[in-house]
Image (cartoon, rainbow, N blue to C red):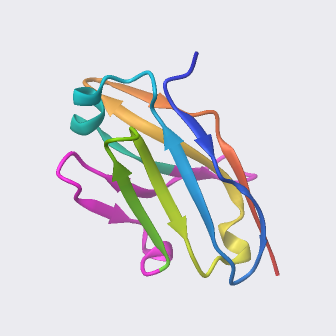
Amino acid sequence: QRQLVESGGGSVQAGGSLRLACKASRMILSTFTGSTMGWYRQGPENKRELVAAIGPGRTTNYVDSVKGRFTISKDNTRKTIYLQMNSLKPEDTDVYFCYADIQDERFWGQGIQVTVSS
């Protein structure tokens, strides 16, 4: 049973919005709040790119191509992180993977498809 379960992907037209969620229901709260978590995306060439990350102190970082359009956030009560994606572009089309760094191990979600049509 996976540690991380993603939801919220789908298809949208360019300029539209989607919100991805990654729930860590099996993770104890102290581990969740103390972990760095984020999102990667992987395209047809299987190259995985870090999109956004949020640290234990809620510091965030983004790949340049999504700055100003995507926002990562963390809800400790729900043990869930979110990726709000606005002004989506066709080049944002990819499979998005949630991850969590816990001690020396990285855990991954199953991946979720985001498709943006022009």
The answer to whether residue 64 is magenta is: yes
Above or below, 72 against 88 in this view is above
- Give the percent coordinates (x, y) of residue 4: 51, 31
User: Where in the figure is residue 39, as x and y percent of width and height?
Assistant: 48, 50
Quadrant of the drawing holding the N terminus: top right
- Residue nearer the viewer, 90 or 34: 34
Vertical arrangement, residue 64 with respect to residue 84, above or below: below
Q: Which residues are magenta?
A: 40-68
Identity of the residue furthest to the left in this view: 57
Q: Farthest front residue?
A: 77
Asked if 84 appears above or below 81 in the picture, the reply is below
Residue name at image x 51 percent, y 66 percent: 84
> On the image, which quarter does residue 20 sit in?
bottom right
Image quadrant holding the C terminus, namely bottom right
Residue lying at 22% horizontally and 28% vertically, measured from the top left: 30
Report how many numbered discs are placed on residues in the image. Answer: 0
Q: Is residue 35 left or right of residue 79?
A: left
Q: Is residue 81 above or below residue 65?
A: above
Q: In the rendering, at what x and y percent does residue 107 appear?
A: 45, 28
Q: Nearer the viewer, residue 33 or 115?
A: 33
At a point 43% along the width and 68% down the height, the residue shown is 71
- Where residue 8 sits: x, y (%)? 65, 52
Residue 16 as seen in the image, left or right of residue 57 = right
Asked if residue 72 lies in the magenta stretch, the reply is no
In the picture, residue 11 is in which quadrant? bottom right
